[in-house]
Image (cartoon, grey):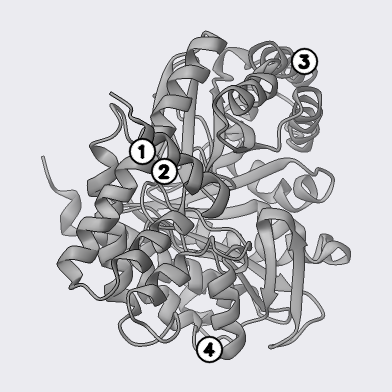
Amino acid sequence: MINTKDILETIRMIQDENLDIRTITMGISLLDCCDSDIGRACNKIYDKITAYAKNLVKTGEDIEKEYGIPIINKRIAVTPIAMVLAACEKKDPVRFAITLEKAAQACGVNFVGGYSALVHKGFSPGDRELIESIPEALSVTDHVCSSVNVGSTKSGINMDAVALMGQIIRKTAELTADRDCIGCAKLVVLCNAPEDNPFMAGAFHGAGEPDCVINVGVSGPGVVRAALAKAGDCDLTQVADIIKKTAFKITRMGQLVAREASRRLGVPFGIVDLSLAPTPAVGDSVAHILEEMGLECCGAHGTTAALALLNDAVKKGGVMASSHVGGLSGAFIPVTEDAGMIEAARKGCLRIEKLEAMTAVCSVGLDMINIPGDTPAEVIAAIIADEAAIGMVNSKTTAVRLIPAIGKKVGEELSFGGLLGGGPVMPLNTWSPARFIARGGRIPAPMQSLKN
């Protein structure tokens, strides 16, 4: 039973502590849109997306008004387009990107994800064509997001795909250099990509998903930080307990919104992703939670341990609050999207090596990091390989979303606006991994894959 105290607490969380539903994401299967004629396939895709998602934005806005809960984004995720492209006789993948853009505009959503390929064990028909088209596709669209899965615990790491993605990220930055290289902010390279992730840029609708589904991503770093601030000086066991209780409350709100959106849209409820997703807004930072635990600045020694505690406690608290938890679920560390991490990077306390260590215990990876514009493609590829290795060996999702700041050097800044934020160009280790990357082939799956 909900009492007055609970209601007032939720109101305070929303008004003062930046509590929100980060996204309602509708997943839509495009498998029945496959056609040998690319024109017919594009028409089917547009018609299906606009039919299923025509009321998505309005439904989200109605729930916002009725419950007083901010819902920041309304998004769509579709079947990896490389799968649809495989059926086409004439492979012109950018036409699919333009179709997705038109559908996104017609439905009024913030982003559409799924301009994607899954190549963790090799390239099948349509995969290479789609990957090579990503720079152009992201340069001619505003709402389309792209992802490529290059590794998994079961299959190992496709190093040919890793090398290719180093080149693709550089080219994407170059084609959108006049817009602060924004294309790269919509492109992520993954290992162990989940099929039900509601967060961009890595969202796609997996082949094992139903025809249409509603997934919700919650957020609330400010709420967690405020709860710890009120607790004062307590030991780390008590800190974990406070985070668990707070994550439970946040996720219950997400479950409510997910069920209500599912009912109103007549679409099955999929999962709640109980991640702490920060924003550039003051008071909405994962870094500030870690500093509230006792670190002078995010990036100091002890940051990885504090993040491990936070991520574990969020999962333990949130999983009790929802009938279906999925996606990424934990704490995100996107540098340009987190006010505390932006400041720590400017101070030089937070460096990419420390971020890499943090990705071993958080929910995603090296996310939204500005790097020097002259970074060679093989260095980018090597960073992807390192991050994929962490995900592969630890049986977790890891990701890389790097933005080569074309024409800019360490210390200069990029600004994307909105939730994508902005921040300084961070230094990289410049010793060359070119010979290692040029070997190609596959890094074999680890012993952890042999679970049968």
Is the residue 23 above or below the residue 359 in the image? above
Can you give x and y, in whole percent of width and height, for residue 407 in the image? 82, 80
Q: Which of pointers 4 and 2 indicates the residue nearer the eye? A: 2
Residue 325 is at least partly visible in this image: yes
Mark 2 and mark 3 lie on one chain; the one further toward the N terminus is 2
- Say which amino acid is labelled 2: Glu
Proximity of marks 2 and 1: CB atoms separated by less than 8 Å:
yes
Is the residue 362 above or below the residue 300 in the image? above
Q: How crowded is mark 1: few (under 14 residues within 10 Å), some or many (20 or more)?
A: few
Q: Which of pointers 1 and 3 indicates the residue nearer the eye? A: 1
Proximity of marks 1 and 3: CB atoms separated by less than 8 Å:
no
Q: In which quarter of the image is residue 143?
A: top right
Residue holding disc 3: 43
Apparent side of residue 109 relative to residue 342 in the rendered image (left or right):
right
Circle 2 — which element? helix
Mark 4 and mark 2 lie on one chain; the one further toward the N terminus is 2
Residue holding disc 1: 5
Proximity of marks 1 and 4: CB atoms separated by less than 8 Å:
no
The residues bearing labels 1 and 4 have C-alpha atoms spaced at a distance of: 52 Å
The residues bearing labels 2 and 1 have C-alpha atoms spaced at a distance of: 6 Å
Give the number of the disc on residue 44: none
- Say which amino acid is labelled 1: Lys
Residue holding disc 4: 429
- Residue drawn at x 36%, y 34% is 252
